[in-house]
Amino acid sequence: MFNLPTTNIGGPELFVLEFGDIVIYFSPYTAALFLFALIFTALAIVSRPEQQVDITFGGDAYYAKEVDLNSLQFQRFMAIACGLATLGAMVTGDVFNFTLFASMVGITNIGIVAAYRNRHVLNAAFQYGIVAMLASVPLFGGAAIILANTGTLSMWELFTDALVVPIIAKAFLVIGIMGEGMAPFYVAKAEITRAQGAPFILMIHVSSLLLFLRVIEIVLSM
Amino acid sequence: MKSNQSIITRISATISRLENLTGLYALFLVIVVVLGFVTLPFITYHGDQLYPKTLDPESTLDPYDRGGVPFGTTPVKAQYPENSPFVGYVTTYLTPFSQWLADTTHHMGTTIVAHPGGIIDEILYNTRGLDTVVETSILFVAFAIASYLFRRDG
């Protein structure tokens, strides 16, 4: 049973972990993504936030932006939660489990930026929050269509040639991940990076990039 | 916006505005959903479901009647039965009061305290346990964000 049906994209399996019907697997591809997420989670745990300084143009004055302890702790907590959700999404072998991890990444991304008081940042976070909320419909809808059409959710079965996943379910999954991880929506990201606290903000970018890479692997393998 | 600008400049100016982000995503979504409606007749329902569900309107536990025999062996379908050697054992059952309520009235299934056991609980807690963990984590994170935002000005 535990031979990865398709090795074209992810490579051969390295390690398998069974949680009942949810069988987690590491292939060279997912293991590399997992390692990236692990490194960035470790960085979020140990690093201190950057101290931003605004310099007034044409003068000597400057503003140092303070990061208070409360918001630092909360952002670190959210960044670590985001990293853990990304770790899960990278290696899970079940479509519904993947969508759950993806929506957790979306919520923690909002949590990271919600701690700021800058009006522009909060405005961007609000817009992104609406997109993430909207995205959960196609995300879980895609998983539901897959279950209704094939009768299973396990990627081990779906990756075989015997089961054909409808193209619309794949499109739903991709557009759902686009909304949750806001991978192509760099407008919101550019506003969000105005916020201080570099390592925690960067977790948003890392998680969305890794999620997008993973969903492409899943969609191509199915 | 000036009228002599090229079409690419205008598109770029529109999508670079943060306020248009939600509308842009909604547009993508509507396009995909319309495509979904077009291809809907070609999507067939797979009869042999891994997680079957039946509703019995006559049952006093409806819509939460999940079948299964209390303290017996309940057959549960699983994708990989060898990974769940104790499937069929971990069920939740009615308390004596709930059992009395279910026997005498028809309102047991509509109360929040309804906890009849059976197949769905097996699926949730045994074969798909990791899903349950992640779902609760999502709720916890959402509550953490809400409570942080509520308390920080206080």
Image (cartoon, helix red, strand yellow):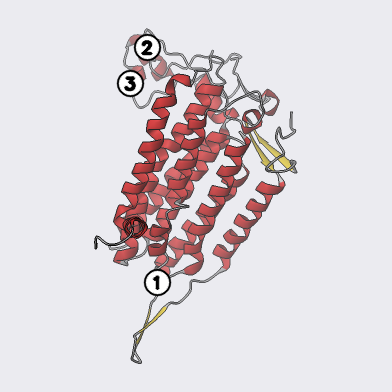
Query: B58 above or below A189?
Result: above
Q: Nearer the viewer, mark 3 or mark 1?
A: 1
**Above or below: residue A168 compared with residue A118:** above
Instruction: Report helix, strand or loop for mark 3.
Output: helix
Q: Residue A151, image x and y in percent?
A: 56, 22
Are the numbered discs 1 and 2 placed on the same chain, yes or no? no
Label 3 crowd bin: few (<14), some (14–19), many (20+), radius 10 Å: few
According to the image, label 1 marks what residue? Answer: A68
- Where residue A164 sits in the image (x, y, percent)? 59, 26
Give amino acid for label 1: Asp
Which residue is depicted at the point 38% across and 15% down? B62
Residue B136 seen from this side: no
Secondary structure of the residue carrying numbered label 2: loop
Q: Quadrant of the N terminus of chain A?
A: top right
Marks 3 and 1 sit apart, C-alpha to C-alpha, by 48 Å
- Front-lying residue, B24 or A192: B24
Whether residue A171 is visible to the viewer of this picture, yes or no, is yes
Q: Residue at x 36, y 50 (%)?
A: A129
What type is the residue that disc 2 sits on?
A: Thr
Q: Residue at x 58, y 61 (%)?
A: A40
Q: Which residue is mark 2?
A: B60
Residue lying furthest front = B4
Q: Which mark is residue B110?
A: 3
When the figure is inspected, residue A158 is found, relative to residue A51, above or below; the finding is above
Task: Say what amino acid the circle numbered 3 marks.
Answer: Thr
Q: Does A28 sit above or below residue A41?
A: above
